[in-house]
Amino acid sequence: MKRFLGMVSLAVLAACGAEPQGITPQTSGTAASQEVLMPPPAHEKRPSVAPAPVPFFNAPASGVAYGYAANANVQAFSEYYAQRGISRAVLDDFFARAGYRANLIRLMDKPGTSRPWYEFRRNNVPAAKLAAGRRFYAANRAVIDRAAQQYGVPAEIIVAIIGIETNYGANKGNIRVADSLATLAFDYPRRGAFFQNELVEFLKLAQEEGRDPMGFTGSFAGAMGMPQFMPSSYRKWAVDFDGDGRRDIWNSVADTAASVANYMKVHGWQTGGRMIVPVALNITPQLQAVIDEKTALNYTVAQLKQMGVMPLATVSDHEKAVLFRLETAPNQYDYFIGLNNFYTVWQYNHSRMYVTAVRDIAAGVGAYGL
């Protein structure tokens, strides 16, 4: 893998009507958060970064403007990271060319929609997507199966992730990642800390890969390639599986399949384990409170049984599970427990509906018993 000299070598969706928020940006910020991310240790003085004017310059009709290098926040950011392994020349060159895109702020500020499952499934698991998944798998079976075998993750899960994220690579996004991350890092205070961190990861990524940072494209939030990895996810989990010296998640199905599988393995995928089991129950205030908890494997199946939850398929009492419901028709709900592999996929995108859709796409491609 190519690396520029002098660079310190250091070791991620689709908007899905998520629960209070995976590989796409999930961390939360506050409107008052104006400082650069990744603070120094407690004994080290942190740079003071004044709030940027909003907007700090006027974008032209195209929605792209240039001039970040003159911004006080950017200057403080550059000074801070120039002392921590990123060349000042690289930083200055990047901010001289990165563009502000006002439309990205509008996209990020769209109110989140809480679509019911029956609408979400119709939009994300249509028959056409299942058929396309089968074609995609058939056309790339050799490399996908090899990745599945090496990492212990079903091939159909790999296919499903690529399918729900980018329609099997057809919709990877065409916005310059440099523009997305610069705009959201310095003109979107609510999530600015998260995107400043991703910007740092992106600059390191570009130097490690020996590429001009202006040459990367992705989603409006900076997620990249067929699996929509954020830069930090790319650096941690992307894989060069075809052996050409590059981790090409934009064009290489082999690299993409292995990167998705590697993510799942690192995040706890258990080979042969189930994801979701339907249950029967009479809803009580206690069970509703459990459903409303943040997603985590806080209970064993045995504990949920003691609360009145009856699995409708065989599952070990000792397994950890999360109880959830899906609205299958207006004001009608089905109930489920999500097991370890459910939680693994949830870490990719923090939506219970997303995880269920991945399971359903995988089933449509040919993986049963998940």
Image: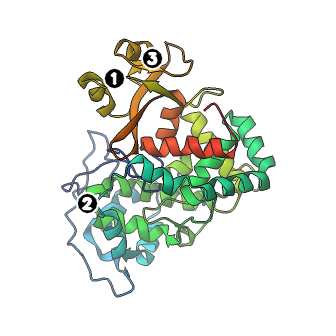
Give x and y (percent) for residue 137: 73, 51
Q: Amino acid at mark 3?
A: Val
Apparent side of residue 361 relative to residue 110 in the rendered image (left or right):
right
Give x and y (percent) for residue 304: 39, 17
Q: Residue visible at 37% across and 81% down?
A: 63
Give x and y (percent) for residue 101: 37, 75
Above or below residue 129? Residue 295 is above
| Residue under pointer 3 | 301
Q: Residue visible at 45% across and 25% down?
A: 279
Q: Residues within 10 Å of mark 1 (few under 14, many from 20)?
A: few
Say which of marks 3 and 2 sits in front. 3
Give x and y (percent) for residue 103: 35, 74
- Quarter occupied by the N terminus: bottom right
**Occupied quadrant, residue 221:** bottom left
Q: Counting residues from the N terminus, which is met first, the one under dot 3 or under dot 1?
A: 1
Apparent side of residue 191 relative to residue 220 in the rendered image (left or right):
left
**Occupied quadrant, residue 333:** top left
For residue 190, the mark is none
Say what secondary structure mark 1 lies in: loop
For residue 189, the mark is 2
**Occupied quadrant, residue 353:** top left
Quote the CA–CA distance across marks 1 and 2: 44 Å
Q: Residue visible at 30% across and 48% down?
A: 28
Q: Residue visible at 66% across and 52% down?
A: 256
- Quarter occupied by the C terminus: top right
Q: Amino acid at mark 2?
A: Pro
Say which of marks 3 and 1 sits in front. 1
For residue 282, the mark is 1
Apparent side of residue 327 relative to residue 125 in the rendered image (left or right):
left
